Amino acid sequence: MKLFQTLLDRRRFLQSSAVVGATASAVGVTGLTGLAQAPQARAQTPRGETVVTKSICAQCPARCGIDVYTTDGRVHAIYGDTGNPIANGKLCPKGHLGSYFLYDPDRFKGPMKRTNPEKGRDEDPGFVPISWDEALDMVAERLNGLRERGESHRFAHFYGRGWGASDAGLYGDFGKLYGTPNSAIGHASMCAEGSKRAKRATDGNDSYNSYDYRNTNYLLIMGASFLEAFRPYNNVMQMWGHMRSKSPKTRVTCVDVRMNPTMAAADRALYIKPGTDGAFALAVAHVILTEALWDKEFVGDFYQASRRFVSGESIPEDSFEENWVHGLTEWWNQELKDRTPEWAEAITSIPARHIRQTAIEFGSTRPAVALFERGPTGHTNGTYNGMAIHALNALVGSLFAKGGLGYQMGVPYGDLPVSADDYLDDYARDGAWKDQPRIDMAGTERWPMTSHMMQETGPNHLAGDPYKLDTAMFFYTNPIWTAPDPKVWEEAFKDVFIIDTSPFPGETAMYADLILPDSTYLERLQDSPTYPFEGWPMTALRVPAVEPIYDTRHFGDILIGIGKRLNGPAGEYYRALDSVENVLHHRAAGFADNPGDDGVNDFESWKEKGVWYKKPYHWRLDRGRFYEWGGLDYDLQMSPEEVKAKLFKTPSGKCEFKSGFLEEHAAYIETEMGIPRERVGLIQWVEPQHSGGDGDLYFVTPKTPLHAEGRGANVPHNIAIHQPIVGGRDTVYLEVHPRTAQERGIRNGDRVRITSDLGSIEAECRFVAGHRPDTLVLPFEFGHWAQGRWAKGRGPGHSGEITANVSDPISGLASYYTGKVRLERA
């Protein structure tokens, strides 16, 4: 009754207010003068139906599921997909900016050909529109001509981000059918190949790790920019919140050369001299063994309980029984016994007491994970640095354990509608192209342990070694800007017929003879198996939120379109393959016998849900034994042979502290790195070889959360918040320690010159007292001379122009962080 009376009184008040308002409006009640008469309410113009499309973000490798909101055919909002295990309804700062890429006014509107034969920064390509048929015919005529002359190896295809069966899955067959060793030169050697090769050398898996963050109690983060750019970034931030709020919370030690969000949020922040991460990790390993903190069930133990690891003292070769590791005794005797914290302090500049405390915490807080990325590996000693860090995971028994790390399972895709092996002609099987090395020389005697060496292509072509390219096609990569020392590429590719498929007018596109513009990620149909995430298999589907708003095509269909025009059986194969949509329908057929946890069992349900996944991860280490998932639990104990076949794919079938993979290339490593042949397999300290001439300061160029892998420079919102720590708006500042600047007479905000042996660039400096005094920081993204109206000519000079083309001899990773420079007022 009381509630009813309250509602009645409110209704009467509103009625009386309306009467008073009407009277005041009509007769001008005294005391209410100056009030504006309210306009009569009008119904809003009806809008079209809002459609929500399940798709995937493409601004970094994370592959977060997104819900794309479209009304009247226009995208107006993007949110994280609640049904996607990576996104969980959330996005990082980049994710909401997708419509800026779709509606970028500078993007290419359709296929075009070049009319100006001259190429260079200041040359207008003179692009004119052409039809897709004309464009694809031009490419096919060129490729068919090369093949007829026995020169098909002079065609190369370069890619930066392969997404799945709908593009990356087509590369290999194209090269095999057409006849070129250069069908799939990826940018991994300019990205993060070092971490993959370090893991191959230790546990046999040439891959990035998956992580069980939910159950981790200790994180040792080394040079990974965990809260800025570690994959999958969106989910990493979510897991950070979980790890730091659970009880007990995950303890974090961060080791880096500069202040960054991860360092600021960690329990312990340790500043390390660039390139010395391996020395730090070896000292941590030394303490774990001398303090008897290793996982004895995984690693093994002394035959005699009274024996111990003692600094500086060898142990008898037959005194230790190894379980799931190989070479521990030799590692200790020849390397580790002398790698004390005091030794490491002299190399890394980290106080010995902090190294020892970190080691004791890491060794006694289970489960614990050591992770790293390009910080430690972006140097000439990168593989050995990475191996030393990864070895810590073995010492504490975290490999394949709960709360530890593993590797990504594959997706049970169905077969393609046709097999490329059925369409090989004599040239494809036995042509002279098979005797030709790749243009980047990956996998040859020059770079025997590498899979990709994209940064070598420009210099190799310029020198005609091993030969000259005729035609090059680019997808999702812009090496004329991103490669170290990119001016070499600018000179080299003046005489190459360039086909660029980027939707945007980047530097490589300005050298293009033919533009075949890809659709943006909001306009594509494309599959996307996850990068290593939590281990269990997962693949999302990128569904077009809108039809292409310009005359663009998905790259997979461009490649198939070229293939259909090839002479001989290759053309028949691509005509049978038909289209990306047909490819994906056949791939999705594999889900019929493997339905996902969300019910996805065919193409239509995949399109509706946006993602297929199937938990759990299939393998688990528990108390020194390996088990496989039996359907209800990890109840199938694995034999050593099964462990070798599925988990430790090394010569020994164990995690190797003395690497059989490296020993297979002992002569090469001895020649290139000066390590005695009998020692090359050991995880060890190797001095980095810094480039830069007589520079006295280290120069690092990290990614930031808004980096978007070099494709966000023409997005205004990206520019505005690209460098939040020092307040960059229209530019990116060089971050300098105040003492370093003052010693050189430089004031905060001064224009400065940064010089290496390649040349100089200029930037505006900002003081950051949180960095190492010997290290300059210039976030990577700015300095474009193309890419669009907001990117071109903005900010400091391009960091790549003073970064030497030097690489780790083992992994081939470009040593972006190993250069030294000089600093002065401009």
Image: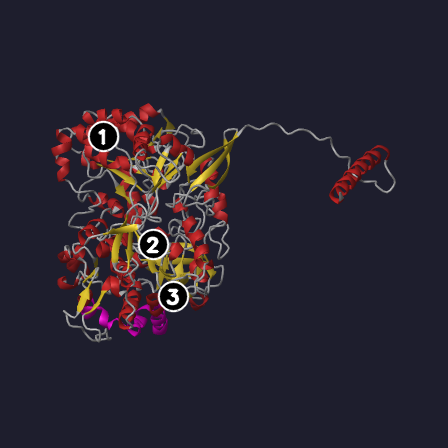
Give residue 591's quadrant in the image: top left
Name the magenta segment's main secondary structure: helix
Question: Circle 1 is placed at which residue position?
Answer: 143
Crowding around mark 1 (Cα neighbors within 10 Å: few <14, some 14 to 19, many 20+) is many
- N-terminal of the pair, mark 1 or mark 3, is 1
Can residue 332 be seen from the camera position used here? yes
In which quadrant is the N terminus drawn? top right
- N-terminal of the pair, mark 2 or mark 3, is 3
Q: CA distance from mark 1 to mark 3?
A: 52 Å
- N-terminal of the pair, mark 2 or mark 1, is 1
Question: Circle 2 is placed at which residue position?
Answer: 802
Element type at mark 3: strand
Q: CA distance from mark 2 to mark 3?
A: 24 Å
| Percent of width and height locating residue 239 | 42, 53
The label shown at residue 271 is 3
| Percent of width and height locating residue 671 | 15, 59
Kindly identify the amino acid type of the residue bearing the numbered disc 1.
Leu
Give the residues in magenta. 331-358
Kindly identify the amino acid type of the residue bearing the numbered disc 3.
Tyr
Kindly identify the amino acid type of the residue bearing the numbered disc 2.
Ile
- In-image side of 670 versus 454 (left or right): left
Q: Nearest to the eye among marks 2 and 3: give it.
A: 3
The front one of 805 and 450 is 450
| Percent of width and height locating residue 778 | 41, 56
Give residue 818's quadrant in the image: bottom left
Crowding around mark 2 (Cα neighbors within 10 Å: few <14, some 14 to 19, many 20+) is many
